[in-house]
Image: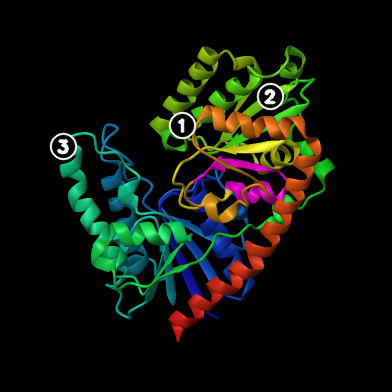
């Protein structure tokens, strides 16, 4: 039995966390012994699989700060993960053969301090240094050693996997000194278990009282409340669409903006308020429902009941939401860049658009006016997921990498 430890900074409900949980479940299904080590795990704000007693989740170091007076988030994340790695190596007594880590590579040299060298697999969702803005000279000075450390420590992994061909290209452009490091693409999969419950059960548990009466066409935006996700584009697209519809049609149109929300994260709190203000300025506040941290049943019910999902981030490294939507027979309207270029079939399972309100509203109008198109795209999307992003294929590929590392 191969023993695998996952190291992840914050086991919340984002796309990276979804991949880690699916990977852990996949390896368990292949007979591996699995533990997930993290610096934060809130039982009220997590994926349901992490509450299963058969999946061992270990949380250490949550007493360490996540920021200093609202600043130094990256430095604090590095220190928290270094602590988790030190605890695993020197204090835990845990036995393991392979460590799967993602997001924060600085823990890799700590893992090398183990008396018996362990193999390390690093999964790169996207270079961290590209996920932050550096508008001042002080911020650039602060980030310079962190960026360099990210590149050096990423190259210390025994195997590096990325989530898309797009990310593989960005990896090579960003980490110039790692041109000799091979990066293999392992697409995230979809664990379909929570999506396969009877529709009536999902609707009963998921949408009770959430959607106003009289809604005939529902659109959905599903992303964390972060500015980089461009959620305002969904509101602007809705506003643009309403200008081209007759008053009677407008009455049946509704948008749900749902996504991960954490009171501890200042950006989540601020951006939620910003979006509500934007909806009011656009005059669409009565046509929008904002939902924070939806439950699994709510998410699936929304996907099943929507005419289309509006996926607004640009240059998204992969994005599991379009895959979830397609499996639920929900057409996808996404920005024509990044991961959706690989996951969404343009004109077949949805539409790839420029990141403008006009482009999104035109795609929304096609789905609004043609129910048969919605059904055809929905069925094509489900077939695409079953063929390209099945958990079975993901499990086999990941298990193969783990076995090669132990040989």
- Characterize the local packing of mark 2: few (<14), some (14-19) or many (20 or more) Cα atoms within 10 angstroms: many
Mark 3 or 1: in front is 3
| Numbered badge on residue 138 | 3
Q: Nearest to the eye among marks 2 and 3: give it.
A: 2
Going 74% across and 21% down the picture, which residue do you hit? 212
280 within the magenta span: no
Residue 324 is one of the magenta-drawn residues:
yes
- First in sequence: mark 1 or mark 2? 2
Q: Is residue 122 above or below residue 119?
A: above
Q: Does residue 210 appear left or right of residue 14 in this picture?
A: right
Residue 38: quarter of image: bottom left
User: SS at mark 3?
Assistant: helix
Marks counted in the figure total 3
Distance of mark 2 from mark 3, alpha carbons? Answer: 44 Å
Residue to which mark 1 is pinned = 263
Q: Is residue 79 above or below residue 285?
A: below
Instruction: Determine the residue positioned at 82% across, 48% down.
Output: 198
Pointer 3 local density, CA inside 10 Å: few below 14, some 14–19, many at least 20: few
Whether residue 283 is situated above or below residue 61 in the rendered picture: above
- Look at the numbered disc 2 and give the secondary structure of its residue: strand
Coordinates of residue 241 in the picture (x, y in percent): 63, 23
Query: What residue would you read off at disc 2?
Result: 254
Q: Is residue 178 visible?
A: yes
The colour scheme of the drawn protein is rainbow
Q: Give residue 153's position: percent from left, percent from top.
A: 27, 64
Q: Residue at x 62, y 55 (%)?
A: 49
Magenta residues span 321-336
Q: Earlier in the sequence, mark 2 or mark 3?
A: 3
């Amino acid at each position: 039995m191969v023993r695998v430890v996952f190291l992840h900074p914050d086991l919340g409900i984002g796309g990276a966390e979804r991949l880690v949980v699916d990977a852990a479940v996949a390896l368990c299904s292949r007979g591996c012994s699995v533990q997930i080590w993290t610096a934060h795990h809130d039982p009220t704000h997590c994926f349901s699989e992490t509450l299963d007693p058969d999946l061992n989740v270990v949380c250490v170091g949550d007493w360490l700060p996540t920021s200093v007076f609202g600043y130094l988030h990256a430095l604090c994340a590095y220190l928290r993960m270094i602590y988790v790695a030190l605890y695993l190596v020197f204090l835990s007594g845990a036995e393991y053969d392979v460590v799967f880590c993602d997001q924060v590579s600085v823990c890799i040299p700590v893992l090398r301090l183990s008396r018996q060298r362990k193999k390390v697999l690093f999964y790169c969702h996207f270079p961290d240094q590209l996920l932050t803005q550096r508008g001042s000279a002080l911020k650039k000075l602060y980030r310079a050693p962190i960026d360099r450390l990210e590149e050096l420590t990423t190259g210390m992994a025994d195997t590096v996997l990325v989530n898309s061909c797009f990310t593989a290209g960005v990896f090579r452009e960003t980490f110039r000194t790692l041109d000799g490091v091979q990066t293999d693409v392992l697409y995230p999969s979809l664990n379909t278990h929570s999506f396969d419950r009877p529709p009536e059960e999902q609707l009963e548990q998921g949408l009770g009282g959430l959607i106003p009466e009289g809604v005939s066409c529902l659109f959905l935006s599903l992303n964390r409340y972060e500015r980089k996700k461009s959620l305002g584009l969904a509101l602007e697209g809705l506003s643009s669409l309403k200008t081209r519809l007759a008053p009677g049609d407008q009455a049946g149109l509704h948008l749900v903006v749902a996504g991960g929300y954490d009171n501890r994260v200042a950006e989540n709190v601020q951006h939620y308020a910003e979006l509500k203000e934007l909806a009011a300025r656009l005059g669409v506040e009565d046509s929008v429902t904002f939902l924070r941290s939806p439950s699994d049943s709510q998410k699936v019910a929304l996907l099943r009941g929507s005419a289309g999902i509006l996926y607004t981030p640009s240059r998204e490294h992969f994005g599991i939401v379009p895959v979830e939507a397609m499996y639920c027979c929900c057409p996808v309207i996404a920005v024509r860049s990044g991961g959706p270029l690989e996951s969404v079939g343009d004109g077949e399972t949805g539409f790839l658009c420029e990141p403008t309100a006009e482009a999104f509203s035109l795609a929304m109008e096609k789905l609004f006016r043609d129910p048969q198109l919605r059904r055809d795209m929905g069925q094509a999307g489900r077939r695409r997921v079953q063929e390209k992003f099945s958990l079975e294929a993901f499990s086999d590929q990941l298990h193969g990498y783990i076995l090669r590392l132990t040989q």
